[in-house]
Structure formats: C-alpha cells, structure tokens
Amino acid sequence: MNELNNLVSIVIPIYNESESVELLTNEILNVMNSNNIYFELILVNDGSNDSTLQILNKLSSNIKELKVLNLRKNYGQTAAMAAGFDYTNGEIIISLDGDLQNDPNDIPKLIQTIKEGYDLVCGWRFERKDKLISRRIPSKIANKLIGFVTGINLHDYGCSLKAFKKEIIKDIKLYGELHRFLPILANIEGAKIKEIKVNHRSRIYGASKYGIDRTFRVLMDLLTVWFMNKFLTRPMYVFGFIGIVSIISSLIISSYLILIKLLGEDIGNRPLLMFALILGIAGVQLFSFGLLGELLIRTYHESQNRPIYRIRSTFGETKN
C-alpha cells in the first residue's frame, strides 16, 4: 500500500470555467491515480452563468470521486472555498484554482511536505506566466507589504495551490475575502507553515476574474488580519494603550493650561485647550472600546467553546 493512502480532499472553486473544468478534472484524475492516492474531488460551482454547471453534472455522473457543490449565486472565492472545506472528509485538503494555471502535478509534492510534519504548505509560483505590469509587479508589492505588516514573510500569498491539515481548516473561519490571507489565519491557530516552489502555467481559456478593485479589498482585509494576528485575544492592548496615552496627554496639557491661567493669562481662545479636550474625550472612548473588545472576545470564545490555545501533541500519561 502506498504511503499516501489516507484520503485527500481536493477543493476547487469554479466560476465560468466551462472550457477548462473538464480538462482540469481529467488532469487531477490522472495525477492522483498514477500516484495511487486515495482522494475525493470537490468542485464548487460559484454561481456560474455559462455552461459550467451542465458540464459538472455530466462529469459527476461518470467520476465516482467527484462531488459537485452548486451555490445559489456568485458568493466569491472565499465563500466557495469555505463551502468546499465544509464538505471535505480527508485528513489532508488541497486547494487550487479552476483556470488550469495551477499544475495538478504539484499535488503529490504538497502532500508529501504535509506528511513531513507541516500544517500548511503554500505554493510559490516561482516563474509566473502572468502579465508583468498588471499582475506580477502589483503581486510582488502586495506580498512584501503583507509580510511587513504581519511579520509572516511568504513569496506568494496569492497562489491558490495550498495543502492543509484538516485540523487547521476546522479552526479557521473564513468570511469576507480572507482566502488570500489563509497563511496568516493559520498562523493565528499556531500552524507550522512551509512554502515550496510550484509550476505556474499561462491562462489558456477565459479571462482573469480580478480587477483593480481587488487592490482596495486586499488593503482593507490586510488591516483586519493584522489586528487579528496581533490583538485577537487582547484588544485592550491596542485600544487601551492609545486611550491611556491620550488621557495622560490631555491631563498634562490641562495642567499646563491651569497653571498659566492661575498666573493670569487668558486660555479661553487657545487652540491647545480644544486639543486637550479632544484628547481627553478620545482617550476615554478608546479605553472604553478596549473594555468592550475584551468583553466581546470573551463572549466569542466562551459561546463557541473556543480555546485560546492549540495543542500540537502530548507525550506521556496525563492525570487529572
């Protein structure tokens, strides 16, 4: 029996990929069967308005490993991936795009790396075949920015070809458009992460689904994951600290103004008086935000019975 005999789940979001979906499915079947990998293939139709659904229905009737999830409308890649993850049965989960640019021949390499003890293996499109100005340069800038902000330095955050342990995916809640930040979300859960070089192919059919608006979504999501990565269990550390600094600054300025008032100077028209007032009000509000954040985080963890720690392994006998 092959060492890669555990069930592997492959999740692929599909949106208007009628020309490529059958080719991709056949490629995956050939790779997995030639490597004797026991697998299931989950294709998530994310509200396609071409003939993708008809092709998927035809494929599902002929391929026993194939499961098709047909979403009611186009929810976006993050929701489609989350739906696919929810229906997986394998201990190892592979994600990739449905446009044929990710190479299924890299899947066994990702699985083997997971079996070496990693929780998440990210693909690195070492030699990208996308356009230089519109895709590769913005992507390189985004990767540097994300690494700088989060402290998790990867060469290619945008590569959909990834491998996960099921236990990591179960701990991650996807929403918005956070699929591109899966390594950061996994890091919050204590995942052991590795990046490996993978093949990247030119797009043959269709056009990219991403526009210039993606840049603004990435920036907004980056602020979200930065806060989650740094202060998810301790929001008081950011709001409370800034609030206390504002309150102390307000007290210092107010004390100075009171002193010069006692010395006979008029302070009623001084901009510094308004500044001290604003600092005081803002400080109290920020400190209150920190307290509310602490209560919300406690409610979040306790209502979902969600621990604030993760255990990788235990050794020896534990006694209560």
Image (cartoon, rainbow, N blue to C red):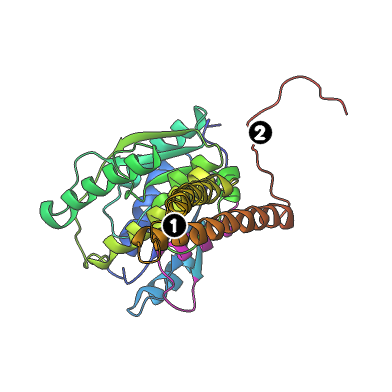
Residue 197 lies in the magenta stretch: no
Indicate the position of residue 286 as horizontal and vertical percent values: 53, 57
Instruction: Please tell me whether residue 20 is drawn above or below residue 193 in the rendered image.
Output: below
Specify few, some or many for label 1: CA neighbours under 10 Å numbering under 14, 14-19, or 20 or more: many
Is residue 84 in sight in this rendering? Answer: no
Q: Can residue 84 be found in the magenta stretch?
A: yes
Name which residue type carries label 1. Ala
Viewer-nearest residue: 274 or 191 = 274
Query: Which numbered disc covers residue 201?
Result: none
| Residue labelled with disc 2 | 311
Which residues are drawn in magenta?
70-90
Q: Quadrant of residue 205?
A: bottom left
What residue is at 58 percent from the left and 53 percent from the top? 290
When the figure is inspected, residue 79 is found, relative to residue 173, above or below; the finding is below
C-alpha distance separating marks 2 and 1 = 48 Å
From the image, state whether disc 2 or disc 1 is nearer to you: 1
Residue at 23%, 38% (x, y): give it.
126
Rendering coords of residue 213 (x, y %): 27, 67
* Residue holding disc 1: 276
For mark 2, give the secondary structure. Answer: loop
Neighbours of disc 2 within 10 Å: few (<14), some (14-19), many (20+) = few
